[in-house]
Amino acid sequence: AKDQQPDLKTAIIYDWGGFGNLFDHSNPTHQEHAEGEENTTERVVEYFTKEKPNFLFVHLDHVDHAGHSEGHGTPAYYESVEKADQLIGKIMAAVASSDVSDETVIIVTSDHGGVGMGHGGESLAEIEIPWIAYGKNIKQGKVLRSAINTYDTPATAAYLLGLEIPQPWI
């Protein structure tokens, strides 16, 4: 993105501090560690409302944390999923009330599933992830029948931004 569209305004706002080790800090035009899912959501809404970036990556950690501390599929895990739904709703409300809502696509996904308190195996519960797209040119109610992989997310985002997708990307 930086090479193809140098003026693209990109941002990352993340909850889990370790996430800061997972990306090249020279790329986003804005980056922020806003600890806690509620604080992260507030910062996302504030930043989006003011700046309206071309690309905004948001990381909420509490569902992952619940899976690893309480167990995937436990009542505490599903409570964290419900809370994520509410927080994403706040972000979507900010998008809906903006002047770029008709041009915006929101993708909600996860990096992995889980079994017990872990992940990394090959079971469907560990590798199957939610993948939801909403917004401009997204067909409402369409269910994708093919497998979705975490690698599909960056390729989809690049396509939506009008970027040439690097050949080696899956």
Image (spheres, rainbow, N blue to C red):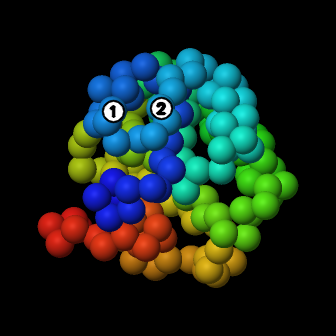
In this figure, which residue is indicated by the disc labeled 2?
31
State the residue position of label 1.
25
Q: Which amino acid does label 1 sit on?
A: His
Residue 4 image position (x, y, % from top left): 32, 64
* Residue depicted at x 49% and y 36%: 30
Q: Which quarter of the figure is the N terminus placed in?
A: bottom left
Image coordinates for residue 134, horizontal then vertical, percent: 64, 66
Relative side of 33 to 52, left or right: left
Question: Percent from the top left, x then y, of residue 11?
Answer: 50, 42
Q: Residue at x 61, y 64 (%)?
A: 105
In the rendered image, the vertical position of residue 45 relative to residue 55, given as above or below: above
Q: Nearer the viewer, residue 5 or 20?
A: 5
| Viewer-side residue, 141 vs 48 | 48
For residue 89, above or below residue 65: below
Q: What residue type is labelled 2?
A: Gln
First-in-chain label (1 vs 2): 1
**In the displayed structure, does residue 67 sit left or right of residue 18?**
right
Residue that appears at 43% across and 73% down: 162
Secondary structure at numbered mark 2: strand
Separation of disc 1 and disc 2 at Cα?
Answer: 8 Å
Q: Can residue 59 be seen in this view?
A: no
